[in-house]
Amino acid sequence: MGREKSINVPVDRFTTQVSNMTIKMISRRAKYLIFQLQDGSCLLLYLILGR
């Protein structure tokens, strides 16, 4: 089953914001991975697990 990948900001803006950023910490909450970045922002990744 294919799923479309998406981000909630324009690709150019996303690339600019995360380029050369250091990940300070990674945590997990349910099916989400939370990447805490050096500037205090977070990148949220939803884990899609197959059966």
Image: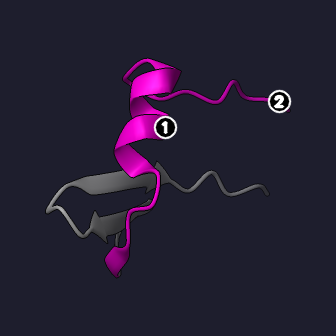
Query: Which amino acid, mark 1?
Result: Thr
Left or right: residue 19 versus residue 6 is left
Residue at 36% from the left image edge and 67% from the top image edge: 35
The disc label shown at residue 15, or none: 1
Front in this rendered view, residue 4 or 19: 19
Residue 18 is one of the magenta-drawn residues: yes
Q: Secondary structure at mark 1?
A: helix
The tag earlier along the polypeptide, 2 or 1, is: 2
- In this picture the colour scheme is one colour
Left or right: residue 36 versus residue 3 is left
Front in this rendered view, residue 42 or 29: 42
Cα separation between marks 2 and 1: 24 Å
- The quadrant the C terminus occupies is bottom right
Left or right: residue 12 versus residue 29 is right
The disc label shown at residue 2, or none: 2
- The range drawn in magenta is 1-25
Q: What is the x, y in percent for residue 9?
A: 37, 22
Q: How many marks?
A: 2
